[in-house]
Image (spheres, grey):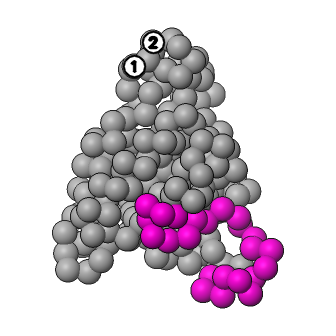
Amino acid sequence: MSGKKQNILIGITGSIAAYKICELIRALKKKDVSVKVILTKAGEQFVTPLTISTLTENRVYKDLFVDDAGAHRDMPLLEHINLSDWADVCVIAPASANTIAKIAHGIADNLLTSTVLALPKEVPLIICPAMNVNMWENKMVRKNMSVVQEIADIVGPKKGRLACGVEGMGAMADVEDIFEVIVKKLRSFNGK
Protein backbone atom coordinates (compact mmCIF):
# COMPACT_ATOMS: atom_id res chain seq x y z
CA MET A 1 0.00 0.00 0.00
CA SER A 2 1.07 3.59 -0.51
CA GLY A 3 2.58 6.04 1.96
CA LYS A 4 -0.74 7.86 2.42
CA LYS A 5 -2.85 6.45 5.23
CA GLN A 6 -5.69 4.40 3.77
CA ASN A 7 -9.30 5.01 4.86
CA ILE A 8 -11.71 2.11 5.13
CA LEU A 9 -15.37 2.70 5.91
CA ILE A 10 -17.19 -0.36 7.23
CA GLY A 11 -20.96 -0.66 7.49
CA ILE A 12 -22.16 -3.24 10.01
CA THR A 13 -25.78 -4.37 9.67
CA GLY A 14 -28.03 -6.73 11.63
CA SER A 15 -26.55 -10.22 11.48
CA ILE A 16 -25.01 -12.54 14.01
CA ALA A 17 -21.89 -12.45 11.80
CA ALA A 18 -21.30 -8.86 12.98
CA TYR A 19 -19.01 -10.08 15.77
CA LYS A 20 -16.52 -11.29 13.13
CA ILE A 21 -15.96 -7.72 11.95
CA CYS A 22 -13.96 -7.04 15.11
CA GLU A 23 -11.26 -9.33 13.68
CA LEU A 24 -11.41 -7.55 10.33
CA ILE A 25 -10.92 -4.19 12.05
CA ARG A 26 -7.95 -5.56 13.99
CA ALA A 27 -6.37 -6.91 10.78
CA LEU A 28 -6.83 -3.57 9.01
CA LYS A 29 -5.41 -1.62 11.94
CA LYS A 30 -2.32 -3.88 11.89
CA LYS A 31 -1.80 -2.67 8.30
CA ASP A 32 -1.92 0.94 9.59
CA VAL A 33 -5.28 1.56 7.93
CA SER A 34 -7.68 4.15 9.31
CA VAL A 35 -11.09 2.59 9.97
CA LYS A 36 -14.44 4.22 10.63
CA VAL A 37 -17.65 2.28 11.18
CA ILE A 38 -21.29 3.00 10.50
CA LEU A 39 -23.35 0.80 12.79
CA THR A 40 -27.02 0.34 11.91
CA LYS A 41 -29.63 0.03 14.66
CA ALA A 42 -29.96 -3.69 13.90
CA GLY A 43 -26.16 -4.08 13.85
CA GLU A 44 -25.99 -2.52 17.30
CA GLN A 45 -27.94 -5.51 18.61
CA PHE A 46 -24.95 -7.72 17.80
CA VAL A 47 -21.87 -5.55 18.55
CA THR A 48 -21.55 -2.58 20.84
CA PRO A 49 -20.43 0.90 19.86
CA LEU A 50 -17.87 0.78 22.70
CA THR A 51 -16.22 -2.33 21.25
CA ILE A 52 -16.11 -0.86 17.75
CA SER A 53 -14.85 2.57 18.84
CA THR A 54 -12.13 0.96 20.96
CA LEU A 55 -10.92 -1.17 18.05
CA THR A 56 -11.11 1.58 15.42
CA GLU A 57 -9.88 4.38 17.68
CA ASN A 58 -12.69 6.46 16.15
CA ARG A 59 -16.19 7.24 17.24
CA VAL A 60 -18.96 5.04 15.84
CA TYR A 61 -21.36 6.64 13.37
CA LYS A 62 -24.98 5.64 13.84
CA ASP A 63 -27.40 8.43 13.05
CA LEU A 64 -28.13 10.27 9.84
CA PHE A 65 -29.05 13.37 11.82
CA VAL A 66 -27.15 14.21 14.98
CA ASP A 67 -29.46 15.59 17.66
CA ASP A 68 -26.79 17.78 19.20
CA ALA A 69 -24.94 19.04 16.13
CA GLY A 70 -22.63 21.06 18.34
CA ALA A 71 -21.19 17.88 19.84
CA HIS A 72 -19.94 16.70 16.44
CA ARG A 73 -18.74 19.88 14.77
CA ASP A 74 -16.36 17.87 12.58
CA MET A 75 -19.32 16.60 10.53
CA PRO A 76 -22.49 18.53 11.40
CA LEU A 77 -25.56 17.28 9.53
CA LEU A 78 -23.51 16.13 6.56
CA GLU A 79 -22.12 12.92 7.99
CA HIS A 80 -23.10 10.83 4.98
CA ILE A 81 -21.28 13.21 2.62
CA ASN A 82 -18.20 13.58 4.80
CA LEU A 83 -17.93 9.82 5.39
CA SER A 84 -18.38 9.01 1.70
CA ASP A 85 -15.71 11.58 0.74
CA TRP A 86 -13.35 10.26 3.45
CA ALA A 87 -13.48 6.61 2.33
CA ASP A 88 -10.99 5.01 -0.04
CA VAL A 89 -13.02 1.78 0.14
CA CYS A 90 -16.46 1.10 1.59
CA VAL A 91 -17.28 -2.37 2.91
CA ILE A 92 -20.64 -3.58 4.18
CA ALA A 93 -20.03 -6.64 6.31
CA PRO A 94 -22.20 -8.33 7.25
CA ALA A 95 -24.75 -7.09 4.71
CA SER A 96 -28.28 -8.06 5.67
CA ALA A 97 -31.06 -8.78 3.16
CA ASN A 98 -32.70 -5.54 4.32
CA THR A 99 -29.67 -3.38 3.57
CA ILE A 100 -29.04 -5.13 0.25
CA ALA A 101 -32.66 -4.41 -0.77
CA LYS A 102 -32.32 -0.75 0.17
CA ILE A 103 -29.11 -0.38 -1.83
CA ALA A 104 -30.62 -2.20 -4.83
CA HIS A 105 -33.54 0.23 -4.86
CA GLY A 106 -31.66 3.41 -3.93
CA ILE A 107 -33.38 3.80 -0.57
CA ALA A 108 -31.44 6.15 1.69
CA ASP A 109 -33.33 6.09 4.98
CA ASN A 110 -30.40 5.67 7.35
CA LEU A 111 -26.79 6.80 7.63
CA LEU A 112 -25.34 3.70 5.96
CA THR A 113 -27.58 3.68 2.89
CA SER A 114 -27.33 7.47 2.52
CA THR A 115 -23.53 7.20 2.64
CA VAL A 116 -23.51 4.44 0.01
CA LEU A 117 -25.62 6.61 -2.29
CA ALA A 118 -23.19 9.52 -1.75
CA LEU A 119 -20.03 7.51 -2.50
CA PRO A 120 -17.95 9.02 -5.30
CA LYS A 121 -18.07 6.70 -8.32
CA GLU A 122 -14.38 5.83 -8.02
CA VAL A 123 -14.70 4.53 -4.43
CA PRO A 124 -15.01 0.74 -4.47
CA LEU A 125 -18.00 -0.77 -2.67
CA ILE A 126 -17.66 -4.29 -1.27
CA ILE A 127 -20.75 -6.12 -0.02
CA CYS A 128 -20.49 -9.25 2.13
CA PRO A 129 -23.94 -10.85 2.47
CA ALA A 130 -24.91 -12.87 5.54
CA MET A 131 -28.36 -14.33 6.17
CA ASN A 132 -30.43 -17.46 6.60
CA VAL A 133 -30.30 -19.93 3.68
CA ASN A 134 -34.02 -19.45 2.91
CA MET A 135 -33.54 -15.69 2.78
CA TRP A 136 -30.48 -16.08 0.54
CA GLU A 137 -32.41 -18.31 -1.86
CA ASN A 138 -35.50 -16.08 -1.89
CA LYS A 139 -36.30 -14.75 -5.38
CA MET A 140 -36.53 -11.17 -4.13
CA VAL A 141 -33.08 -11.36 -2.55
CA ARG A 142 -31.64 -12.97 -5.70
CA LYS A 143 -33.12 -10.15 -7.80
CA ASN A 144 -31.73 -7.51 -5.43
CA MET A 145 -28.30 -9.20 -5.54
CA SER A 146 -28.32 -9.09 -9.36
CA VAL A 147 -28.81 -5.31 -9.16
CA VAL A 148 -26.23 -4.79 -6.41
CA GLN A 149 -23.51 -6.83 -8.13
CA GLU A 150 -23.56 -4.27 -10.95
CA ILE A 151 -22.32 -1.58 -8.55
CA ALA A 152 -20.35 -3.54 -5.96
CA ASP A 153 -17.93 -6.40 -5.51
CA ILE A 154 -19.70 -9.27 -3.74
CA VAL A 155 -17.70 -11.39 -1.30
CA GLY A 156 -19.60 -14.49 -0.20
CA PRO A 157 -21.72 -15.80 1.20
CA LYS A 158 -20.43 -19.29 1.80
CA LYS A 159 -21.98 -22.57 2.79
CA GLY A 160 -21.76 -23.41 6.47
CA ARG A 161 -23.61 -23.97 9.71
CA LEU A 162 -25.85 -20.96 10.20
CA ALA A 163 -26.93 -19.35 13.47
CA CYS A 164 -30.42 -20.86 13.03
CA GLY A 165 -28.83 -24.32 13.28
CA VAL A 166 -29.16 -25.41 9.66
CA GLU A 167 -26.40 -26.11 7.16
CA GLY A 168 -26.62 -24.05 4.00
CA MET A 169 -25.57 -21.07 1.91
CA GLY A 170 -25.71 -17.73 3.72
CA ALA A 171 -22.76 -17.61 6.10
CA MET A 172 -20.63 -14.49 5.76
CA ALA A 173 -17.36 -14.96 3.90
CA ASP A 174 -14.26 -15.58 5.99
CA VAL A 175 -12.65 -12.43 7.39
CA GLU A 176 -9.40 -13.34 5.62
CA ASP A 177 -11.19 -13.37 2.24
CA ILE A 178 -12.84 -10.01 2.91
CA PHE A 179 -9.50 -8.55 4.04
CA GLU A 180 -7.81 -9.79 0.84
CA VAL A 181 -10.43 -8.12 -1.37
CA ILE A 182 -10.09 -4.85 0.56
CA VAL A 183 -6.31 -4.85 0.14
CA LYS A 184 -6.64 -5.53 -3.61
CA LYS A 185 -9.14 -2.68 -3.96
CA LEU A 186 -6.86 -0.31 -2.07
CA ARG A 187 -3.98 -1.16 -4.39
CA SER A 188 -6.08 -0.68 -7.53
CA PHE A 189 -7.67 2.51 -6.15
CA ASN A 190 -4.24 4.01 -5.45
CA GLY A 191 -2.86 2.88 -8.79
CA LYS A 192 -5.33 5.11 -10.66
64 part of magenta stretch: yes
Q: Residue furthest right?
A: 67
Horizontal side, residue 106 vs residue 148: left or right: right
| Residue 46 location (% of width, % of height) | 60, 42
Which residue: 75% across, 71% down? 65
- For mark 2, what is the residue? 167
In magenta segment, residue 62: yes
Task: Assign the N terminus to one quadrant of the image.
Answer: bottom left
- The image quarter in which residue 82 lies: bottom right
Q: Position of residue 111 (x, y in %)?
A: 66, 62
Question: Residue at (32%, 68%) from the top-left corner?
Answer: 33
| Among the 4 quarters of the image, the one containing residue 158 | top left
Q: Is residue 28 visible?
A: yes
Return the residue at label 1.
160
Q: Residues within 10 Å of mark 2 (few under 14, many from 20)?
A: some
* SS label for mark 1: strand
- Does any portion of residue 119 appear in the rendered image? no
Q: Position of residue 72 (x, y in %)?
A: 66, 82
